[in-house]
Amino acid sequence: MVAAPATARGAATRQRIVEAATAEFAQYGIAGARVERIVTAARTNKAQLYAYFGDKNALFDAIFMASLERIMNVVPIDSADLADWAVRLYDEYLRRPDLIRLATWARLERRPTGHLVEDANRLDAGKLAQITDAQRHGLVRDGDPFDLMAMVIAMSMAWSPVSSVYSASADEPDSAHEPRRAFLRESVARVCAP
């Protein structure tokens, strides 16, 4: 049997570290996460983890930024239909509750106030430009585009793992999700109406 090239093996190891670290940070946060558990789950060693990511904090940063970018790519904004965007975010939180937990840990342990990330403009610029354009065309209400975006995202998280009332699960039947989706869609449409 021929060994896989080092780059393929390296990419596979790096991916295992990312997956193990995502689960670890989502469950335990930054302070509670343990590198030993991550390397054990990833079937690698600390030297390999540190070679790829530097240290535990840099590893969290990489995981967290990748999770934010994933949500942006998997659930791109539709400024002409912010209600649909909110429902698609709701569905993504069902599929990947770990992504919401990562954001919660970042808020709790890193940035208790202000933007969730230092480079928020890079992440939000496209969404804000689309909302501004939709406002210009009379598709959504006037007001600060950032506040409108923040409200839609907050509404989409009403049943997410950060809810203080109820956390929905992908294990629930679709008959439980459909009324929530309909209510969310109607609520966001009303809030965003011009």
Image (cartoon, rainbow, N blue to C red):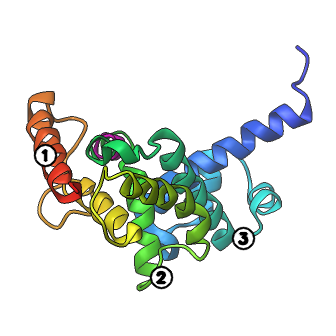
Q: Given this view, does label 1 or label 3 mark the residue nearer the observer?
A: 1
Q: Which residue is mark 3?
A: 55
- Residue 51: image x %, image y %? 83, 60
Q: Secondary structure at mark 3?
A: loop
Q: In whole angstroms, how far apart are the C-alphas of marks 2 and 1?
A: 32 Å
In the image, residue 54 lies at what x, y percent?
77, 68
Quadrant of residue 154 within the rendered picture? bottom left
On screen, residue 134 versus residue 170, left or right, reads right
| Image position, residue 127 (x, y; %) | 48, 56
Q: What type is the residue that disc 1 sits on?
A: Glu
User: Residue 1 has which mark?
Assistant: none
The mark closer to the camera, 2 or 1, is 1
Magenta stretch, overall SS: helix
Q: Residues within 10 Å of mark 3 (few under 14, many from 20)?
A: some
Q: Is residue 141 left or right of residue 181?
A: right
| Secondary structure beneath label 1 | helix
Instruction: Tell me the CA gap for discs 1 and 3.
Output: 45 Å
Image mark for residue 186? 1
Where residue 130 sits in the image (x, y, percent)? 47, 53
Q: Residues within 10 Å of mark 2 (few under 14, many from 20)?
A: some
Which numbered marker is on residue 111? 2
